[in-house]
Image: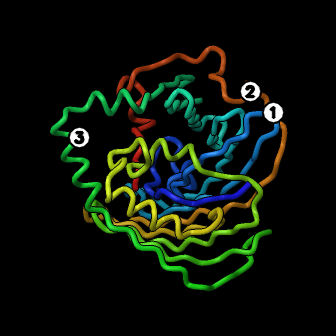
Amino acid sequence: MTTRFSGAANAHSLIRGMRLTLAVLLASLLNLSAVLASDEGIYLETLNRSTGLMGEAPQEELSKTYLAHDKMKVASSEAEGTDMILDPATGTMTFINHAAKQYYTINIASVKEGMSQPGMEQMRAMVAETKITVQDTGESQKIGDWNCRKYLVSKTGMMGIEQEVWATEEVDFDVNRFTEMMSLSGPDGLLANSPEGAAQQAEMAKIKGYPILTKTKMQMMGSSMESESEVKVIRKEAMPASLFDIPEGYTEREMGKGMGAAMPGPAAHP
């Protein structure tokens, strides 16, 4: 299989209680398009570090990512952390708060349908203003077990983002569909079938392979944040379908009712 890196994603706080667990996901904003449907899956461990996140002290956390059964799960290494499950077949994102033994599910299509048309148009205009440039530096370096190539990514518009991405073409899996659910420039995003969305996707497609190390500097509303996500482990292993189930005894909650403080909604970038 072939790995492609397109889409964007580095807005790191998908979930506050999870803090950095999903940083790798958003730092790369991958587009996952061919997924394992058997018991054999792909397991990844990523070390995520950040400073300046919402005024908090520097943080470091290990996240665990599971790809199998046409689903993706990003799990916190903390027993009482927060997990996220993406299911492209249903178009849903499920957040599981282990500390509260609660979960809530977001249907992405329903969320977009629930927004007023003027609101959608305003948001679409803001996203369309985002300009992305990718520079292949030609530099190479071995990071962990993988030979990587360095790319510089600049994103301007709603916020200023500068990234240093080290990607490898040595991994044996195709990533192209899960975070497309969250990508605003993806086929189901706000910029779907638009020249602006196509331009953003084409620029990010210049990054060849899977990102092993991503360093990000972000400016937003007068505050700055720096983060770093480094993949430490990639391996194939058997994964039961139950790994992607809601734990028994957990209570479903609605958005904003008892869950919001621990898990604000996802932030996505083109």
Query: Callout 2: helix, strand or loop?
Result: helix
Residue found at x 57% / y 55% = 24
| Left or right of residue 88, residue 148 in this image | right
- How many labels, in total? 3
The residue tagged 2 is 241
Q: Residue 120 carries which label?
A: 3
Q: Assess whether mark 3 and mark 1 are in contact (beta carbons under 8 angstroms).
A: no
| Left or right of residue 118, residue 83 in this image | right
Q: Where residue 72 appears, x then y in whole percent?
A: 63, 39
The furthest residue to the left? 118
Q: How far apart are marks 3 and 2 (CA)?
A: 36 Å
Quarter of the figure that contains the C terminus: bottom left
Query: Callout 1: helix, strand or loop?
Result: loop
Would residue 15 be seen by someone viewing this image from the given angle?
A: no
Q: Tell me which label, 3 or 2, sits earlier in the chain.
A: 3
Please name the amino acid that badge 2 sits on: Ala
Front residue of 167 and 221: 167
Q: Where residue 8 appears, x then y in whole percent?
A: 46, 58
